[in-house]
Image (tube, rainbow, N blue to C red):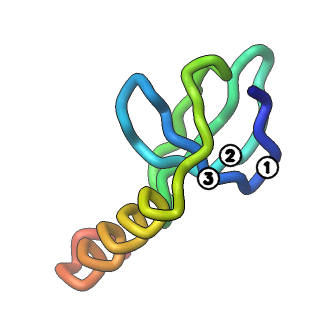
Amino acid sequence: MRPPLGAYVVDTRTGKVGVVTGHEGPYVRLKPYGGGKEWDCAPDALRVATMAERLSAATAYANARSRGEVP
């Protein structure tokens, strides 16, 4: 799977939802929903995020932001 830039995917190794920011060699570059430290993932360890997973990531980010944990 080589998802397009901006796609929401799940890293099946960690269960984290990420946004595709690029393709580096054989890896897909991801960043967490709402920003943060990017990471690389092998394309075979990705799947498209469901709407429920996207909503859950957005809610977690909004809650962390309301607690002042993210800028």
Q: Nearer the viewer, mark 3 or mark 1?
A: 3
Outermost residue, bottom direction?
Answer: 66
Q: Which residue is mark 3?
A: 8
| Residue type beneath disc 1 | Leu
- Is residue 32 placed above or below 57 in the rendered structure? above
Q: Are marks 1 and 2 in contact (CB under 8 Å)?
A: yes
- Is tag 3's residue or tag 2's residue first in the polypeptide sequence? 3
Q: Residue at x 46, y 54 (%)?
A: 36
Q: Residue at x 40, y 42 (%)?
A: 16
Q: Secondary structure at mark 2?
A: strand
Locate residue 71, reporting x and y percent: 37, 76
- Is tag 1's residue or tag 2's residue first in the polypeptide sequence? 1
Between the residue at mark 3 and the residue at mark 2, the CA separation in whole angstroms equals 7 Å
Between the residue at mark 1 and the residue at mark 2, the CA separation in whole angstroms equals 5 Å
Give the left or right position of residue 34, taking residue 24 as reference: left
| Residue type beneath disc 3 | Tyr
Q: Secondary structure at mark 1?
A: loop
Q: Are marks 3 and 1 in contact (CB under 8 Å)?
A: no
Q: Residue at x 25, y 72 (%)?
A: 64
Q: Which residue is mark 2?
A: 20
| Residue type beneath disc 2 | Val
Q: Which residue is mark 1?
A: 5
